[in-house]
Amino acid sequence: MARSRTAVLAGIGAAVLALAACGGGSGSDKAKGTNSSGAKVSSIKLVAAEYSKENTAKFWNDFATKYKAKTGVTLDVQVVSWNDIAQQSTTMVQNNTPPDILNINYYSSYAKDNLLYNADEVLPSSVQSDLLDAFKTSGTFNGKLYGFPDLSSARALFYNKTLFRQAGIAAPPTTWDEFEADAKKLTGLGNGTIGYAEPLGPEEAQAEFSIWAFNNGGDWKDSSGKWTINSDKNVETLAFLKKLSDEKLTQNNPGKTNRTDGAFPLFKSGKAGMIVGFGPLSSDLDKQKKIDYGIAPMPTKGASSPQTYGVTDYLDAFKKPGNQDAVKAFYDLYYQPDEVNTFIKAEGFLPVTKSGLDVFKAQPNLKVYIDTLPNVHLTPNQDPTWDKVLAAVQQNIGAAVGPSGDPKKVLDNLQKTAESGG
């Protein structure tokens, strides 16, 4: 989720998920997958996005060992960075060699092409009933659930309490005017301090733009399903982000700054007063114990109340001759509480289930996320066109905040991409 992740999809620190979406499914300790000739399937392949170098590969390799012991089938694990996974997985699909399971932040174009199993074919009913409605909606194409969420994230405003005190700011901003004024005070501290770390580079530009647009009453689509990328509200939002850059309240070149290797290090080093963040950032800050930080709802302009942007990533199940039972066994094991809990806790994300929310409610530091997660705003993942729009957004929207950038022109072009179907 690097979200691009989307993706994306995230919680805080040492959060522990108790997912009541237990096993079920095949009803056997052995996967009964066969190929078209009737021979037993000996292996399936997982291509997984790398959430962290410390945890992702370790979890999936351990999982593969348990899967083999339980099913007799080998799980071939390939972990790929978020920077490369879209291109690599697209090439696999184009070459007709997709993995059996793909962990990524989209699914609908594959579902449209009839490449994926739906939930009724491979996902335990107990899991389906426990998923939060927002994520079921996000994962549904043509009335069937194809996008099976593995974890989620929600965003909020992180602020450096030490810098706030030094700048004479008593509380985090609640409006855009207050936000801009605070950013000016923070930048005025000098010594390389910036008011706001703004990541509109290709890693996750859609997330940065989305959360600001949602808090100005904008969105990617309207209630009728019509694309509204170049709406007046969205143009106003992107113009505001450009203004922050023009006024030198952000880092240099925000249109090419990525989140994880650009903006986050600025905040973690104490150079940025504010940033939009989520679970993994909080986990890093808590481990390093260098920054006294707070988390607050996003400041608003056109929205009636603070809105959050949410991300969920998916475990897409590709249909291959004879692999259905082996794939089903994968989900039977993954959604066991001991497995999914371990994964989400290690990576520092949020749940996608109702039962998971009940557990997280007991953790005060997650309140700002848990309160908004059931009604979280997501990008229109269920539209097959979104995959192409997402790529265009990530590559092009950052140009709007450059010195000669034109927010309306950039959004007009993105609107054309969406209306043309990519």
Image (cartoon, rainbow, N blue to C red):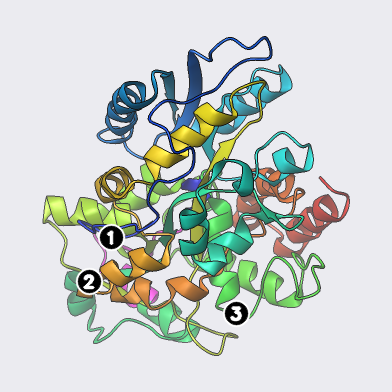
Question: Who is closer to the viewer here, 232 or 314?
Answer: 314
As drawn, the residue found furthest toward the bottom would be 304
Circle 1/circle 3 CB separation < 8 Å: no
User: Judging from the image, what secondary structure is the residue with disc 2 in?
Assistant: helix
In this view, 254 is above or below 317? below
The part of the image, by quadrant, that contains residue 343 is top left
Q: Would residue 15 be counted in the magenta stretch? A: no
Question: Who is closer to the viewer here, 290 or 19?
Answer: 19
Q: Which residue is mark 1?
A: 12
Q: Position of residue 173 (x, y in %)?
A: 37, 83
Ranked by sequence position, the earlier of labels 2 and 3 is 3
Q: Which residue is mark 3?
A: 216
Circle 2/circle 3 CB separation < 8 Å: no
Residue under the point 82% across and 68% down: 226
Q: CA distance from mark 1 to mark 3?
A: 26 Å
The part of the image, by quadrant, that contains residue 291 is bottom left
In this view, 15 is above or below 294? above
Ranked by sequence position, the earlier of labels 2 and 1 is 1
The part of the image, by quadrant, that contains residue 395 is top right
**The magenta segment:** 183-199
Ranked by sequence position, the earlier of labels 1 and 3 is 1
Q: Quadrant of the C terminus?
A: top right
Amino acid type at mark 1 = Ile
Residue under the point 71% across and 18% down: 96
In this view, 14 is above or below 234? above
As drawn, the residue found furthest toward the front would be 27
Q: Position of residue 411 (x, y in %)?
A: 74, 60
